[in-house]
Amino acid sequence: MDEEASIIERFQELLRGENRSLLDFLPPFEDAVTIPETATVVRTHFLAHDANGSPVVEQLAGAMADAAVDFCIPRRKIERALADCAKTGTAAPIVNLNEQARDLFVKSTASGEGGELLLFLLLERVLQRPQLISKMPLKTSSAMHVHGSDGIHASLADDGVLDIYWGESKLYQSSSAAFKDCLESIAPFLRADGVEARKRDLLLVRDHLNVPQVELATHLLEYFDESSSKNMQVRWNGVCLVGFDHASYPNVPTLDTQQRQALADQVGRWHTSAGNRVKEFELVAVNIDLFCIPMPNVNALRTRVLERMGAK
């Protein structure tokens, strides 16, 4: 195995969790769709239903809460805690990390951090793009939110290009407001004139790179060194999560042909709304993965995530 292939393999080892466990609760509705005249790919997901016919909000909230440590705590600290567990035979170090993660979250159901947590899961487990920086520990108070984008993840291509993905999430009651605000928020990081916005976030990545393997970290840091030729091999992309309330929530597998077509027509209108915003904010040439996730009630999901973490 050559050096570049070895680096790519080690980079992929940064991924955590399996996509199946998430997609069981949040299965895709039909195939991903590329919005015409753009480079935006939309993936629509509806919550699965249990045997009683109820959307699995509780199970999704549990999966999100269970990912809080991975989302909030740098890998180096997690590895140290796991080593301590193996050495001492007690789970106390991991319990301590869980408490640290819980305390970093804003204790409000109006907070956007639930969306950031779900976006993290979608990036790592569905798109297979590891987190480059954990921003939550950079907060100076649990009552504030992180600055800049909602997440920064990456992938390494076979040609040596480092694809960086800026993330943005919006969980609103209104679909139109969620699409507008999400794409408006991510636009400063993705447009050609967004050099300063990207630079601020990339300086944070450089100083707080969430990669414990020394050799891999050294390789990645070359991409953030303006004196290195690798700095020219960085490509920026976007990942958006747009969640919103949807009345008469469908149990997709039980729909008849007419009902499924009506739902497909509605999904098509959401795609059109997303495309209009991509064009409005001048993002047509940028690679964007957009997750469109209608929910029975976004506030109920946020509330249950906080409760599952014990952050009431």
Image: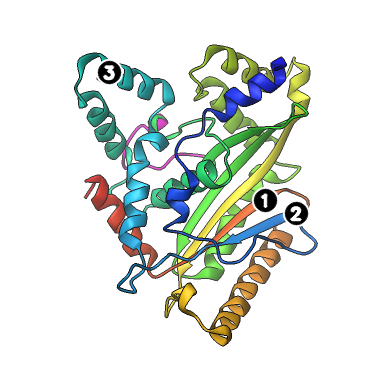
Secondary structure state at the residue bearing disc 1: strand
Q: Which residues are magenta?
A: 138-147
Q: In screen coordinates, is 180 left or right of 275?
A: left
Secondary structure state at the residue bearing disc 3: helix
Q: Picture coordinates of residue 16 (x, y %)?
A: 46, 35
Q: Picture coordinates of residue 248 (x, y %)?
A: 42, 80
> How far separated are the C-alphas under marks 2 and 3?
46 Å
Q: Give the number of callouts.
A: 3
- Which residue bears the numbered disc 2? 39
Mark whose residue sits in front, 2 or 3 = 3
Q: Amino acid at mark 2?
A: Ala
Residue 97 painted magenta? no
Question: Mark number for residue 52?
Answer: none
- Which residue bears the numbered disc 3? 86
**Is residue 238 or residue 84 the one in the foreground?**
84
Which of the two discs, 3 and 1, labels the residue nearer the N terminus? 3
**Is residue 274 or residue 53 the one in the foreground?**
53
Q: Where is residue 56, by image quadrant?
A: bottom left
- Helix, strand or loop: magenta stretch: loop
Depicted 217 relative to depicted 275: above or below: above
Question: Mark number for residue 288?
Answer: 1
